[in-house]
Amino acid sequence: MQQNDETRFEDFVGLISGLYKEIQRIKTSEGARLGLKGSDVMCLYYLERSKDGLTGADLARMAGVTRAAVSRTLASGGGRLRRG
């Protein structure tokens, strides 16, 4: 029975890993069409969803990136980041 549980766990981890890689591939390819990196995509996603705005620290935590990455994303966006 233990072997069966181990196999199921390994299968589960393999599937989750594959899904994560596919999500990263989609973010990279779709972001590239817009001149964005994968981390930029997630930052913009969370900014759009936030009605009241977010601090850099909150945005970094939600997007799973460092605060420095958030600063780079916002700096590279310049005046293009507008709620619309």
Image (cartoon, rainbow, N blue to C red):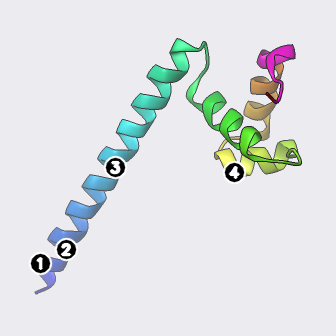
Foreground mark, 4 or 1, reads 4
Mark 4, other Cα within 10 Å: few <14 / some 14–19 / many ≥20: few
Residue 3: x and y in percent read: 11, 78
Mark 1, other Cα within 10 Å: few <14 / some 14–19 / many ≥20: few
5 drawn magenta: no
Residue 51: x and y in percent read: 83, 48
- For label 1, the residue is 3
Residue 68: x and y in percent read: 78, 33
- For label 3, the residue is 17
Q: CA distance from mark 3 to mark 2?
A: 16 Å
Residue 76: x and y in percent read: 77, 16
Quadrant including the C terminus: top right
Q: CA distance from mark 4 to mark 1?
A: 37 Å
For badge 3, the amino acid type reads Ser
Identify the magenta region.
76-83
Foreground mark, 3 or 2, reads 3
Quadrant position of residue 71:
top right
Whichever of labels 4 and 2 marks the residue nearer the N terminus, that label is: 2
- For label 4, the residue is 62
For badge 2, the amino acid type reads Glu
Q: Is residue 15 above or below residue 18?
A: below
Q: CA distance from mark 4 to mark 2?
A: 32 Å
- For label 2, the residue is 6
